[in-house]
Image (tube, rainbow, N blue to C red):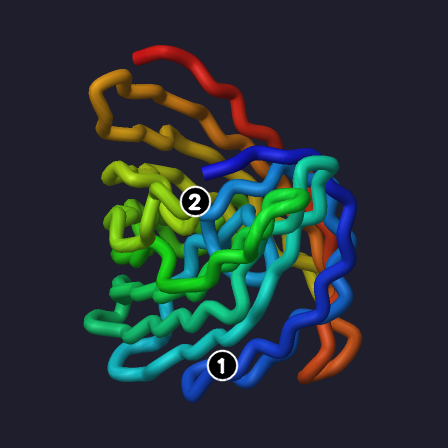
Amino acid sequence: MKMTRMLKTRILRRGSMARCAVRALSLCLLLCFSILAGPPFRTDDPDPVEYHHWEFYCASQIVKEDNGVSGIAPYGEVNYGIAKWMHIHLNVPMNFVQPRGQIAEYGPGDVEFGCKCRLVDETPQVPRIGIFPVVEIPTGNAEKELGAGNFQVFIPVWFEKNRGPWTTYCGGGDLITFSSNPVNSFFMGWEGQRDFSKFITVGAEIFTIIPSKI
């Protein structure tokens, strides 16, 4: 798993049987970290998919660095509402990597499984609050740099507040890598967005990851 500074524009259509919305044209100043949150932002919201509804994503990502190119092309994410306050989550990526001057590698990445739970409903005074623990299973080939090679767990708390067409999310949590030399990282992020129509939303975010030894 790599961390890199990047400035990118992402365009993503978000299809859902529960929520028909499009979040597009996101300008993000970020550190790239594959396990965190969902498209198009790394900072997530605390609102699960509606009960007995499905939500689907399909997107790609590319990272260009001095030592080569890597990314995901594509990844598929599926969410399903198993309760009024909870959905389950599955993310299956296809990763690629091409170090400078070497042969490109392409194949399955690490599978991600999680469960988003809404704990507190929003009121005029109180934000919506939820948790979204995620486990990343090392199914990708770490020798080819297509996977992390270790189990990882991300345990965040997310907050959301709405005011007219404006929405903001913020939160963070611990990312734990289970290995012979375990590392604990803390993620913090903030995102703001505005709805311009029923189908178009424009937003931006900033986040950081602070690594530390366990």
Number of the label disc, if any, that sits on residue 19: 1
- Residue furthest top as drawn: 213
Front one among 81 and 91:
91
Residue count near mark 1 (Cα–Cα under 10 Å), binned few <14, some 14–19, many ≥20? few
Asked whether, in this view, residue 81 is left or right of residue 212, the answer is: left
Q: Residue at x 47, y 47 (%)?
A: 34
Residue count near mark 2 (Cα–Cα under 10 Å), binned few <14, some 14–19, many ≥20? many
Callout 1: SS: loop
Residue under numbered circle 2:
145
Question: How far from the left and from the top, in percent, is residue 3?
Answer: 56, 34
Question: How far from the left and from the top, in percent, is residue 25?
Answer: 77, 66
Q: Which quadrant of the structure image shows residue 164? A: bottom right
Q: Residue at x 30, y 58 (%)?
A: 111
Q: Which quadrant of the structure image shows residue 104? A: bottom right
Q: Amino acid at mark 2?
A: Glu
Q: Which quadrant of the structure image shows residue 12? A: bottom right
Q: Amino acid at mark 1?
A: Arg
Front one among 65 and 49:
65
Front one among 197 and 184:
184
Give the mark nearest the N terminus, 1 or 2: 1
Callout 2: SS: loop
Disc number lying in front (1 or 2): 2
Q: Is residue 20 visible?
A: yes
Q: Residue at x 74, y 36 (%)?
A: 66
Q: Residue at x 29, y 40 (%)?
A: 149
* Separation of marks 1 and 2 at Cα, in angstroms: 35 Å
- Residue furthest bottom as drawn: 17
Q: Is residue 124 visible?
A: no
Asked whether, in this view, residue 131 is left or right of residue 204, the answer is: left
Quarter of the figure that contains the C terminus: top left
Question: How far from the left and from the top, in percent, is residue 208?
Answer: 60, 30
Does residue 173 sit above or below 212 in this rendering? below
